[in-house]
Amino acid sequence: MYPYDRSMASTNDSIILITGATDGLGKRVARDLAARGAAVLLHGRNADKGGAVLSELRRETGSEKLTYYNADFASLEEVRDLADQLLEEHDRLDVLINTAGIGFGAPGSGREESREGYELRFQVNYLASFLLTLRLLPLLRRARPSRIVNVASGAQQPIDFDDVMLERGYSGHQAYGQSKLAQIMFTMELAARLNTSDVTVNALHPATYMDTNMVREADINPTNTVQVGADAVVRLAAAPELDDTSGRYFDGTRPSRAHGDAYDGPTRLRLWQLSEVLSVSSIHDAER
């Protein structure tokens, strides 16, 4: 049932946070890792649904080592509150899997904004995980060796730094694609800054058009099961042969190459600096 059992180190003592764990890929990854014995911290944005998923996964896996945390990534204030809660309740974090995200949207759907007024996909798919990851680095450093896994996509689009929020021309595919490239650029830049195998960070395209609500909402026929993508994510999170691997992009389980901007230092730095400004600006706006 779990194809990596023979090659993976035990996850019995691991504490693993999975964002976007109440549906689709994140839920399947949570189930698989809980079944391996990990203490899984589930994140979602709907408390009722989160409670139901928590009960379901406990029943399916027989594990009581699951906890649910609620935060809407359309609000950076809630992201900060989530990080603060985790920092207060845990002394370490072995693996952070950033799965939370939204897709292209339904055909014909228009531009949406977060509570901070940012383009919604840029915030939910990228900026929220940027902020959460940096806030949780103290927990990841205490657990060394630890891992960060960013679930991105092969559908990458270059970022227009003159119109990052797509105010002059909106396309759901562009919004999604640039948010996913931003995730990969963040992955490469963070790996370079950490410059260590004690805390590794990698990104992946889990599988093309998995059978998820996100894919069906976009009126796309699924071509892969969720389990195919989950196996790729679980491998990045736990396979011992990847202990020293960092700053890489994978297509499923295979090393691959992302969009060229992911390997361009000045472009990555520009995104990092913009992300810091947007995160700080949201704090100041909330305090007014």
Image (cartoon, rainbow, N blue to C red):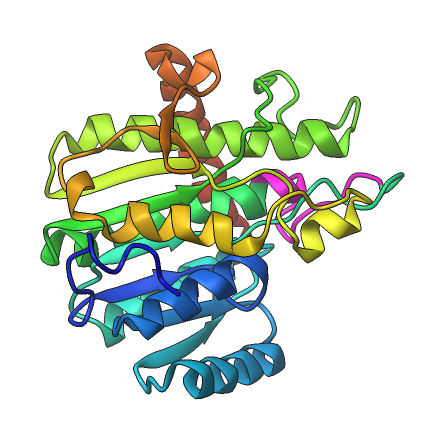
Tell me if I can see residue 48 in this picture.
yes
- Image coords of residue 65 (percent x, y): 30, 81
Extreme right residue here? 108
Q: Specify the segment rendered in magenta.
A: 110-122
Q: Quadrant of the C terminus?
A: bottom right
Q: In the image, what residue occupies the spot 18% across and 72% down?
A: 12
- Image coords of residue 50 (percent x, y): 54, 77
- Image coords of residue 231 (percent x, y): 41, 51
> Residue 88 is drawn in which quadrant?
bottom left
Q: In the image, what residue occupies the spot 36% across and 86% down?
A: 62
Q: In the image, what residue occupies the spot 29% across and 63% down?
A: 16
Tell me if I can see residue 99 in this picture.
no
Magenta stretch encompasses residue 234: no
Of residues 104 and 250, the one drawn nearer to the viewer in this rendering: 250
Magenta stretch encompasses residue 119: yes
Of residues 253 and 233, the one drawn nearer to the viewer in this rendering: 253
- Magenta span: chief secondary structure: loop
